[in-house]
Image: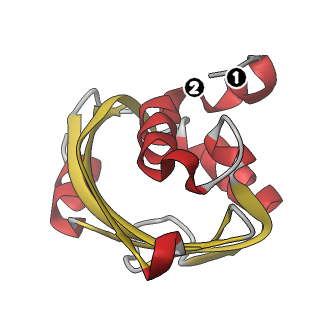
Amino acid sequence: MPSTKYAAYKASKPYFDLVRKSLGDLVDGEHFFDVVADDIVYEVLYDLGWPRVIKGRAKLMESFRGYGDSIELQSADKLITHTADNGRVVVIEYEVHGTILATGVKYNNRFCSIIHIKNRKIAHWRDYMDSLAAWKALTAT
């Protein structure tokens, strides 16, 4: 991370780094939260304890702060990036690998995210994931 400004989000660093890499020079900013619009709509199409829709950068930061209390990511990889609409839409496919902190169970998941860019910031995010993989990791003992 560029500084201690985002130290509270260390558990999600591999994800943030992968997303930032995927967007390259389509956005301005060094860290994931630097490239997110103040009025972002962050939408997830699954129901596993994460809010279905988060509106605003501050609320998104608040939600990610809690993520690190449950899951610590060790890596994010297998990135495939698709750019459309002259760089205004980016679709990324990727995997994350981590640990469920309460149980020590390994967490491996696949995602597909559709990102809309406006004024060189992420304006809208729609996320799909392997819900069964998450459910198995979160309910394992």
Q: Is residue 49 left or right of residue 31?
A: left
Could you say which is closer to the camera, residue 127 or residue 137? 127
Could you say which is closer to the camera, residue 57 or residue 46? 57
Give the residue type that dot 1 points to.
Answer: Ala
Residue 109: x and y, percent?
A: 22, 51
Q: Would you identify the image quadrant in which residue 84 lies?
A: bottom left
Q: Which residue is mark 2?
A: 10
Tags 1 and 2 in contact by the CB under 8 Å rule?
yes
Residue 73 visible in this rendered orientation of the protein: yes
Could you say which is closer to the camera, residue 15 or residue 136? 15
Between the C-alphas of marks 1 and 2, the distance is 5 Å
Give the residue type that dot 2 points to.
Answer: Lys
Q: Would you identify the image quadrant in which residue 135 lies?
A: bottom left
Q: Is residue 16 above or below residue 2?
A: below
Q: Mark 2, residues whose alpha carbon is within 10 Å: few (<14), some, or many (≥20)? A: some
Q: Quadrant of the C terminus?
A: top left
Label number found at residue 72: none
Q: Residue at x 17, y 57 (%)?
A: 133
Q: Is residue 58 left or right of residue 131?
A: right
Residue 107: x and y, percent?
A: 24, 40
Label number found at residue 7: 1
Q: Quadrant of the N terminus?
A: top right
